[in-house]
Image (cartoon, helix red, strand yellow):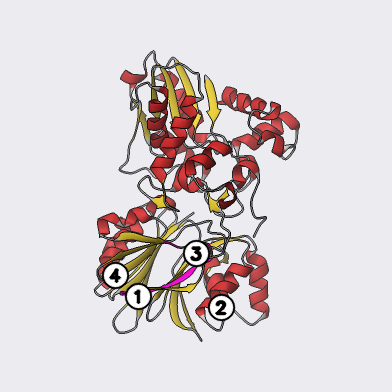
Amino acid sequence: MGGFFGTISKKACATDLFYGTDYNSHLGTRRGGMATLDDDGVFRRSIHNLENSYFRSRFEADLGKFKGNSGIGIISDTDPQPIFVNSHLGKYAVVTVAKVNNLEELEKELLSKGCHFTELSSGQTNQTELIALLISQGKTFIEGIKLVQEKIKGSCSMLILTEDCIIAARDKWGRTPILIGKKDDAYAATSEPCSFPNLDFDLVYDLGPGEIVKLTADNMTQLCAPNAQKHVCSFLWVYYGYPVSDYEGRNVDAVRYDTGMRMAKKDDVEADYVAAIPDSGIGMGLGYAEGKGIPYRRAIIKYTPTWPRSFTPVNQDVRDLVAKMKLIPNRELLKDKKVIFCDDSIVRGTQLRDNVGILYGYGAKEVHMRLGSPPIIHSCPYIGFSASKSALELITRRIIKELEGDDSKDLDKYATTNSEQYNKMIDCIRKKLNITTLKFNTVEDLVASIGLPKECICTHCYDGTGRGNE
């Protein structure tokens, strides 16, 4: 997916920019970048590959060159960023969290107008450069950003560092978040509000869908009001949002805790205790344990110093290795025990397949899995929350193909909780992964836990509902 951080201050911003960007590291694994505007009006930039290292270790040596009071940074799972532009709008730098499904169509349109591309990413047009070129088609930044929102199929949130301010613009449907923080001498904008507390920023505002604001060290000014409709990605709360973060006024860990409570009160399974697959299963596990009235124990511990999130690396072999190596079971707690394990979701089944085998190998008598998300049946056309290239990478679609001979047959029935097709699919997954019992959250309970109206939340990956491919 990716995440960004930008700040503008009355004093040097490099330290806040460095750590603020780093607090988005759980959102991406491919590239990181920072850009600042120094007191002489010179833009300075560094971009590094993060696939084999961490943001802090790659950028610490560059910190001395970042001067000035304003800057933007990015953790990207797509293209190298930030992009520099010199146009009739002036000089500026831009970072994006985006998924551009009509990249080739827009590329041809811009080339036909005499534009050219200089930044290639893996042999393809850099989508952030394409977005920058679209912005520059406008007579003003506002007009250019609105052009991006109108033309892109997918999603796009962005930060623009200009010669006198930072402009923050949220995706047209609000699929990805932008939050504003303030302290005495600075403003900041970020994808992840967990970046604010340790940098002494207070969370003061959530941008609405399509909203555009201008930040200076002293003020936030609305340049464009939010759209009436929004479709926020529900996976923010299920998986990739950090536990201490709030989106739309709803805390990530509180939502996960509530999903566990709700599921436990409907579940008649008997077990010795509840555990979680760390990290994103912990909130749900704690809620489930309270709802069930049985202990919570740490039967699996995550080795945190070196291992990234496991379904974001592009290479399947790397994903498999990470899934196996980063989690360490506790033999003492597992031996001869019936255990309920809570986790965020099953996407490909990579982690769970390996983990369940290890749990039995360490003496677990029964392994019951409870998932915070409903079954993921559709690939996401709106944001890049996983590295899936095909629907058949989803374990649900592989099971449907085995059952029907066609992975796209009767998807609405397979998405309907407790339908004949749904129950058959879940039981096939259970058997394939060698789980004693398996239950997923329902769309209705997830929406209730998030606490926003269903029409404001995107649940496309579970039930296929969404805003087309806008």
Query: Which label sits on residue 216?
Result: 1
SS assignment at label 1: loop
Q: Which of marks 1 and 4 is nearer the N terminus?
A: 4
Which residue lies at the image location 43% right of the left edge and 52% below the top edge?
27
Which residue lies at the image location 39% right of the left edge and 26% below the top edge?
289
Please identify the quadrant where the C terminus is shown.
bottom right
Whole-angstrom CA distance, mark 2 to mark 3, is 14 Å
Q: Residue 175, position in %: x, y?
A: 53, 56
The image quarter containing residue 434 is top right
Query: Which label sits on residue 170?
Result: 3
Magenta highlight: main SS? loop
Q: Residue 200, position in %: x, y?
A: 25, 60
Tag 4 near tag 3, CB within 8 Å: no
Q: What stretch is highlighted in magenta?
A: 206-218
Which residue lies at the image location 68% right of the left edge and 79% below the top edge?
112
SS assignment at label 3: loop
Q: Which amino acid does label 1 sit on?
A: Thr
Q: What residue type is labelled 3?
A: Arg
Q: Can residue 154 be seen in this view?
A: yes
Q: Name the residue carrying label 4.
A: 186
